[in-house]
Amino acid sequence: MWESLIIEPFINALLFIYDLIGQNFGWAIILFTLIIKLVTWPLMSKQIKSSMALQKMQSDPDWVAIQKKYKNDKDKLAQEQMKFYKEKGISPFASCLPTLIQFPVIIGLYQSIIQTMGNAPLQMLNLIPKISPWLTGIFSFIPGLSDPLSLIPLNSQFLWMDIGRPERILIPGISFGIPLLAIIVALTSFLQTKLIASPTGDAQSNQMTGMMNIYMPLLMGWFAYSLASGLALYFLASNLFSIIQYAVLGRFNFENLLPKKKIDVIKKGE
Amino acid sequence: MKLKKNISLLLIISIAVLLFNSCTSRVGAATSWPGFSVDGESAYLSFGAETYAINLKNGSLNWKYPSEVDRSRQAYSAPKVIDGLVVFGDYANHLVAADASSGTEKWIYAGAEDRYIASVEVAQGVVYAPNTDGYIYALDLEGDLLWKFLVDGPNWTKPIVDDTYLFVASMDHSLYAISQAFTASDLELAKNGTKTLRTDYEWKTDLEMAIVADPVLEDGVIYVPTIEGKLFAIEAASGSVIWSFDNDGKLGAVWGSPVISNEIIFFADVNGDVYTVEKDSGKPHWPSAFNAGGKIVGGGVLTPDGVVFATDEGKLFLINSEKEPKTITTFDNAVYSPLNYSGDNILVSPASEEGLLAAFNAEGFETWSFVPEE
């Protein structure tokens, strides 16, 4: 089911875009990412609104009063919390659903990229039956498009990288390759989390956000370092499109990029 | 409290990394099937990080290479034996020559920029090694580069030779004929300043689709199938297409080399259909294909009773020119590797480390089986 619902449609979509834009796989991945972002835009908007609502809720006087009242009764507090969500029309799951959807997309895209590249015999053998007959039909209708089978092998070069391999830049005089794309992915992940985070009144929540701002970019950078550069390209494109998405929805917080001024605590009596 | 939160977050991230790795790591497993060849009383087989020399009389191990396993060096192409040397390429861009009787490494050529998927061919003291970086490397038997020739795509097929030419079928959709004899003027200055680049070729024929099956040369005609599902007969002297066969567009991708027996060509596609066509005209010999019931990837092998094929469902079967099939045996594993025939035994390499090479007689009895040590 995973193959027929995710992998095969992804492979065919990638092949279609690849041929449509002049047989460049790097741009095909970037365009495919844009399409995924546009398709999930409504969910993303809902996520953003939901997380804003959740953040505002922390400083809502009614909620603060409920927390005070039931601070020693966790069960009752949980009940009241659900009631509060319902009254205010807040959906806590809407804030995590797009992220949950992203995970199979990332895995599906990685497997599709590797299989579409067909760098080894087993991958090529598994790729060919996945090229759908309807894709062949579509190709025959659109002038200038080749038979999808004739696209094999795909052109894996994009800028300085081989899409099917981890990216490294070799500089004369340096014995190891520099993972430039991985560094850019980590930086854009950091930028994204910083720009869209909104501090709340809740110290614990802020602490959690702070930790995520460090761990998630490192994790994304590590993935980009270890896996094929096609996936790293997806991460980069996804980060940039997310930043644009948040900017369009007016959810940017440029102040988060600026260093925070320390406010001296004025001691009582001074 | 802060430490507890950090640990929880690290745990969540670790689980995410493990899950991600497990969902993506499948593609990092064996990426091809075993490649093997036969020479004299030994079979030479490459699969993963090891290459084995196997005694054809009883399936015992003569030697394996390397002595210390290096998992970054995976090899799957069938080794070639020449003048006491076993030559094969690996996925770490190395071309290796080892002593055929002991497995001692003689030389390694590391000048290629990508992996070796195809087997090498040797003619008149020259090793021709196609690489997926697009080059065909020509080396002498000491491992020194003589020249290299660049095509427009990766090379996955073993070249073929006659007395004069080297024929290369590439993934760039073309079949090339390159003269084996060359002079210094045939060599051009490469970007790195060395004079080993050849750009001349005798002819080049565009077959419009990628080629993954090793072509076959017989009586001045090259028979080469493509991934689209077409079998071509090309005149070796000129590169002109004599005929092509695609069963009116119903022929599937062909991965295995054709087998020629008594003027009839046997070949199979990934749909499991076995076809026969007449060598001279390309006309079908049987009115319809024989369906084996499973995918056929590796090429068949000619035996005294007919041609033997294997399917990805583990069926080993023989079929003759009268289209009379006979199942020889069945395995639990898929068979993707081409078959071989030696000393009345059919040699099969299932894609499994539990039994890398097995020998069967025509009645289906297993004569021996080679299982590598863990």
Image (cartoon, rainbow, N blue to C red):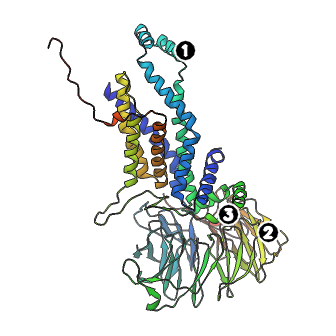
- At 50% from the left and 12% from the top, the residue drawn is A80
Separation (CA) of disc 2 from disc 1: 67 Å
Q: Residue flagged by tag 3: what amino acid is it?
A: Asp
Q: Secondary structure at mark 3?
A: loop
Residue A260, how many percent across, how many down? 27, 31
In percent of width and height, residue B50 lies at: 47, 65
Residue of label 1: A87
In this picture, is B120 found above or below B25? below
- Residue nearer the viewer, B344 or A214: A214
Q: Is A236 left, or right, of B123 in this rendering?
A: left
Q: Is residue A248 above or below residue B359?
A: above
Quarter where residue A190 is shown: top left
> Are the residues at dot 1 and dot 3 in contact (C-beta closer than 8 Å)?
no
Residue depicted at 63% across the width and 56% down the height: A16
The quarter of the rendered structure image containing the N terminus of chain B is: top left
Do discs 3 and 2 share a chain? Answer: no
Residue that badge 2 annotates: B248
Instruction: Give the labeled residue for mark 3.
Output: A147
Q: Residues within 10 Å of mark 1 (few under 14, many from 20)?
A: few
Badge 1 or badge 3: first in the primary sequence? 1
Q: As shown in the figure, which amino acid type bears the numbered disc 1?
A: Glu
Choose between B317 and A89: the one closer to the eye: A89
Report, in whole angstroms, how far the alpha carbon at label 1 lies from the one at label 3. 56 Å
Q: Is residue B110 visible?
A: yes
Q: Which chain's residue wears label 2?
A: B
Q: Nearer the viewer, mark 2 or mark 1?
A: 1
Mark 3 crowd level (few <14, some 14–19, many ≥20, 10 Å Cα)? some
